[in-house]
Amino acid sequence: MNKPNLIIIGNGMVGHHLVEQLIEQDATERYTITVFGEERHRAYDRVHLSEYFTGRDADSLALSDADWYAANGVEIRLHEAVTAIDRDASEVVTDQGRYGYQRLVLATGSYPFVPPMPGSDRPGCLVYRTLDDLDAIREAAKSASTGVVVGGGLLGLEAANALRGLELDTAVVEFAPRLMPMQVDSEGGELLREKIEALGVQVHTDRATQRIEDGVDAAHRMVFQDDKVLETDLIVFSAGIRPRDELARDSALEMGERGGIVVDDQCLTSDPAVLAIGEVALWNNSIFGLVAPGYQMAKVAAATLLEGGESFRGADMSTKLKLLGVDVGAIGDAHGDRTPGAKTFRYLDQIKQQYRKLVVSSDGRRLVGAMLVGDNSVYDTLMQYYSNGLDLPEDPAALILPSSEGAPTLGPDALPETATICSCHNVSKGDICATLDAGAEDLATVKCETKASTGCGGCAALLKSVVDHELEARGVEVDRSICEHFAHTRQELYDIVLVEGIKTFGALIEKHGNQDTHQLGCDICKPAVASILASNFNEPITDAAHIPLQDTNDTFMANMQKNGTYSVVPRVPGGEITPDKLIVLGRVAETFGLYTKITGGQRIDLFGARLEDLPDIWSELLDAGFETGHAYAKSLRTVKSCVGSTWCRYGVQDSVGMAIRLEERYKGLRSPHKLKFGVSGCTRECAEAQGKDIGVIATENGWNLYVCGNGGMRPRHAELFATDLDDERLIQLIDRFLMFYVRTADRLQRTSVWRENLDGGLDYLKEVVINDSLSIGTELEAQMQTVIDNYRCEWADALNDPEKLKRFRSFVNDSRPDPDIIVTEERGQLRPA
Amino acid sequence: MTSATAAATSTAPDWLVVCTRADLVPYSGVAAWVETAEGPAQVAIFYIPCGPNTPRPAGPNTPALSHHDPELYAIDHHDPIAGANVIARGIVGDLKGQPVVASPIYKQHFRLEDGQCLEDEAVKLRTWPLRFDGEKVLIKA
C-alpha cells in the first residue's frame, strides 16, 4: 500500500520540531515524509546563534545528529529551495524536480527586514539570521574595525553581542527612543542603555537612517534624519522580521493584509491539504516571533496530520533573556496599556542597576504583566502568578522589593496542576506528577521523560522544587544517604572530612557512622570515602589504612578484565610519546604476552596481565620513565590533544604543550568519577574537547574553556565557560572548577550529570568559579595545590614496599599461576579463550 | 555421585596449615590453593580483626570468641557468575549486619558465613572452617 506523501518546506527550529513530534508519534507509518531546506545546514539552534562566534560550530548548534533523519525514515533534502507550489497538481517545484504531496506543511519562517533606503545594498551591509549570514559577517569583520547594528530590539542586541565577539567597536542604532521598545518602558530602557554602554557598546536611539554612502574614515557613512552621521566599516540590519510567505502568495493561499499565511486553530491554511506553522503563520491576525509558540504550532500541526484533537490557542509572548550579559524579562501586558484600569508598582535601584515593574489588575488581585531589567531572579515566580492567575499576596510590592530574606517565592504546592513549568517544551506540573506516578524517582528521570528544563533551562530551579515537593508528598523519602552505614550524602561526608581533618575510614565510621548497623562499611561507602580522603590528603591508596577501601582496580592499580587478568595503561601525557618509549611498551607486551590496543584517550592499553606479573611489568615500565596512568581510578584519565601550532597549518596555540601541562598538573587527582580532558589547537577541534569534562580550545588570543561535556552512554556537549584566557587564568579556573566538583558532586557522578543537577546551572557555576561569589576561590586553589604537592606515582611507591608487593601473589601459599586463565590466539595476539 | 559414595571415597576433612597471619590483609582478602578432601580448590580467605569496626555477632567459624579474637572466613575464590577466580579481590563489608564480599567483576554480594549470593538465591559458594593456631592459619578441608 502506498503511503500518502507529506512534504514539509523549511528546516528551521520549528520545522525540525514538527518532524520530532511526527516521529515520536510514529507518523512514518502513515506518511512518506520529505523535508526541504534551502540552507546547506540541517536545522540548528538559532536562539544561540551568537555562540557561533565564541567557539560553537554548525555541528554543535545542530538540533540533531547528522544521520537522525535517515535513521528515522525521513528524507531530508537540504540546499534545495522550493520555488513554487502547484496546488492544482498537488506538487512542489524545486530546480531539481517536482514532488507530489497529499499533505503539505509550510514552515518557511521569516527573513530579516532591511528598511528601504539608498545604499542598504552596499557590500558590507549584512543581515543576521542564518549561519551563512554569520559566515559573511565574520568574513567582512576581517577587514573592519567598527560595526553598527541597525535595530535595538532583541535580535539587534544579539547581533551586537556577535560583533563584540568579533572584536569590533560596536554601536547600536535604534529608531525608537529606547532599546527593546517592545519589552521595556523608558525607565527600563534607560537602565538597559547604561548597562550596555558600560560594556563598550555605543547606543544611538531616536535615529532613523536615511541613507548609506561612502565614508571618509570608514567604509560607510550612515546619514540620519537630523543629518547627523555615523561612520562604520560594517552594518548589520536587524530591524525586525517578515514572514517568508511568497510561495503561499504565489499559489493563492489566503494571506494577511500585511503578510503571513492565514491559519486556523488546527494550523490549516485556506487549502485543507496545506498547513503553516511558525513565523510564517498568521493566527488571529498575529504572527508569533518566538520559538516557544512555534513549537506549540508544530505540536498542533502534528496532531492535525495524525489523529487531530489539538488546537492552537495563541501563545504568551513573555520572555526571559540575557542580552550582552544583561537580564531582561517581560511578562504579559508589561506596559500596562492593554488592560483597562491596570495599576503599577515600580522599583528602581540605580546603584545595582535593577528595575522591576509589576502591572496588576484594577482590584490589585491579579498580575497582568511585569517588566524586569538587570535581574531576572523573580521572573519564575512572577510568571507563575501571571500564567496561572494566582491570587497576589496582600502587598504585591513585596514581590519586587529587595528583602533580606530574598523575594518570597511561590511554593510548589501553591501551583495548580495546569501550571506550566517548562514553557519551551510545554510541560505542566500535571505532566511532572504523571511521570512521578509512573515510577520516576528523581529529577534526572523526570527531565529525561518530559524534556522539562532541557530547552532554555530557565525553569531548572522551579522544576527541582516541584519534583522534590511532589516526591515528598508521595511519601518517597528523598533519602540521599550514601548507604546504610552513613546517614550522610557524599557531599556531607566530604565536608566532615574537610572540617574535622579525619584521615581514615575507621575514624570516620566510628564517629559518624550509623550506630545501629555493623561497622565494616560496604562496597558503596568504602571507595567513596577512599576517594574523599585522597582528594583531601592524597596519601598512597595502597597504604594499610586505605587498602581495604579500594576497588580491585585501585588495589592492584590495574583494570580487572572479565577473566580476572588486568590491563595496564601507563601515562602518556597529551598522547605524546617518544619512539624509545614506544619500543619499551612493545617489548614489555612481548615479554609478558600482552594484547595491545590503542585507547580513545591516546594511550596504549596492555591487556591480559596476570596479577603476579604486574610488579615485574611495572618495574620495566618505571625504568623506562613511565608512570602510572590511573586508568583504573576515578581520577584524571587523559588529556587528549591535537598537534596544534607545532605542526598543523591551522593551529593557533601549542595544544600539545598545554595538554601535557594540564595532565602533569592534575594527574592523581581522585574525584567522584573519572575525568577526561581535551585540548584543541584551533576551532577545528580535532581533539574533540567539547566531549570532555574539561575542554580547552585555542583562540587567536589564548584559550576558550568548556566544561561538563561527556561522551559515553549519554553524550553531552561541553558548555562554553570562559573565553580568551591566558595560561595562568585557564589553570586557575580549572583548579577551582575541579575542586568545586570534587567537593559537591555525588559519588560516581560525572561532571555532566552534576552540572545538570546543579541549582542555578551554568550561571551559578560561573559565579562561583569565575567571580568567586562564595569567596572560596583561594581555598579551592590551595586544596588543589595540596593534592599536587603530595602526588607520588603509586606504582613507584608500591614497588619500594615489600609489604605492599606481598599482595601481588596469585596464591599466598603456592607459587603456581591461576591455571584457569586460558588464552587463545586471534589476529596475531592473545585473548581470553 | 551419592553422598554415601562420596563419604566412602573421600578422606575425612582435616585441619591443614594454609598460610601465616602475616600473609593475611586485615579487612580484606587473599587467595590460597588448598588440596581439600574433594580435590584442589581456590579459596578466598578474609580476615576481619575484632575491633570497634567489626560486625557482631561474629561468624560461625570464629573460635571461642573473646573480645580480641580475629574473625576468619574461607569461601570459594571462584566467582560462578563471572566465571573467573577473583572473589578474594572483592571489597569486604557488611549488609544488614551480615559480613559480605562484593565480587569485583559484576558486584554481586556473597555472605561470608555461608557463601549465599544475596542477589541470586540459586548461587551459593562453598565455605570452610578456618582458625588461627598461633601465627598459623588452619583450614578444615
Image (tube, rainbow, N blue to C red):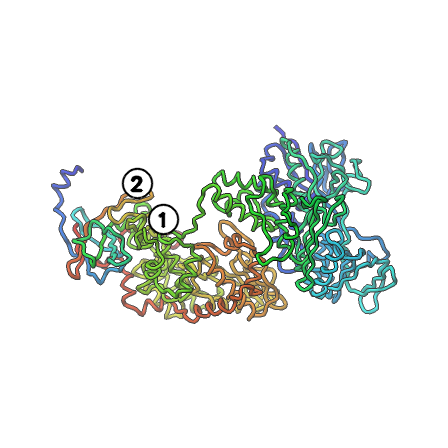
Q: Residue at the far top: name it.
A: A1
Image coordinates for residue A214, horizontal then vertical, percent: 84, 64
Q: Residue at the far front: name it.
A: A394
* Residue marked by disc 1: B106
Question: In which quadrant of the rendered image does the N terminus of chain A lie?
Answer: top right
Q: Nearer the viewer, mark 1 or mark 2?
A: 2
Please identify the quarter of the rendering in which residue A788 is found.
bottom left
Kind of residue at disc 2: Glu
Image coordinates for residue A347, horizontal then vertical, percent: 69, 56
* Residue marked by disc 2: B121
Kind of residue at disc 1: Tyr
Q: Earlier in the sequence, mark 1 or mark 2?
A: 1
Please identify the quarter of the rendering in which residue B52 is found.
bottom left
* Residue A570 in sight in this render: no
Q: Chain of mark 1?
A: B
Q: CA distance from mark 1 to mark 2?
A: 16 Å
Q: Chain of mark 2?
A: B
Q: Nearer the viewer, residue A157 or A728?
A: A157
Label 1 crowding class (10 Å Cα cut-off): few <14, some 14-19, many 20+?
few
Secondary element under disc 2, as helix, strand or loop, is: loop
Q: Nearer the viewer, residue A812 or A442?
A: A442
Please identify the quarter of the rendering in which residue A124 is found.
bottom right
For residue A488, the mark is none
Q: Nearer the viewer, residue A485 or A735?
A: A485
